[in-house]
Image (spheres, rainbow, N blue to C red):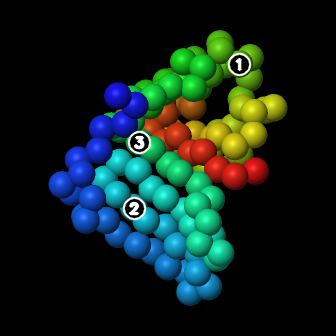
Amino acid sequence: MLFKVDYTRLEDYKVWERGDGFCIYSFDNFKLWFGVNNELEQIGVTKGFFGTYNSVRIGTTMLDIKKIFGRYENDGDVYIIPGIAGICFELEDVDGWDELTAPIEWIFVYKC
């Protein structure tokens, strides 16, 4: 099972709308971004998602990313892997936060 979804709670979500059609649907452990033309543009998953991408999963660290891919880059609030488009990571804010050892809290997949 890649993703544990409690279907009885899917009605429990929040919608943020910008006013031009762009909106974000937020559920317990995932988010969906829709563009102004109502096309799905981005998906974000967090704790409760059990899938992987080349051994990267929720809880992986940037130290692991460095070992697997050789390097990564900080792109503001998210981290990317150079040469791999359409995926980025957000780190968990933990005590004693360190970029290399903080676990990945969110994985985002987006249209390029």
Decide which of 80, 53 is in the foreground and name it. 53
Q: Give the Cα distance between marks 1 and 2.
A: 30 Å
- Choose the circle earlier in sequence order: 1 or 2: 2
Regarding mark 1 in the picture, which secondary structure is present there? Answer: helix
Checking the image for residue 26, the label placed there is 2
Where does the image place residue 28, in percent across and percent down from the top left? 31, 53
Q: Amino acid at mark 2?
A: Ser
Where does the image place residue 51, in percent across and percent down from the top left? 45, 29
Regarding mark 3 in the picture, which secondary structure is present there? Answer: loop
Decide which of 7, 19 is in the foreground and name it. 7
Q: Amino acid at mark 1?
A: Phe
- Choose the circle earlier in sequence order: 2 or 3: 2
Is 55 placed above or below 58 here?
Answer: above
Is 36 placed above or below 65 here?
Answer: below
Left or right of 36? Residue 6 is: left
Left or right of 3? Residue 8 is: left
Quadrant occupied by the N terminus: top left
Residue pointed to by mark 3: 46
How crowded pointer 3 is (Cα within 10 Å; few <14, some 14-19, many 20+) is rated as many
Which of the 4 image quadrants contains residue 73? top right
Residue pointed to by mark 1: 69
Q: Amino acid at mark 3?
A: Thr
How crowded pointer 1 is (Cα within 10 Å; few <14, some 14-19, many 20+) is rated as few
Tell us which disc is closer to us: 1 or 2: 2
Q: What residue appears at the point 18 percent right and 55 percent down from the top-left corner?
A: 8
Q: Give the Cα distance between marks 2 and 3.
A: 11 Å
- Choose the circle earlier in sequence order: 3 or 1: 3
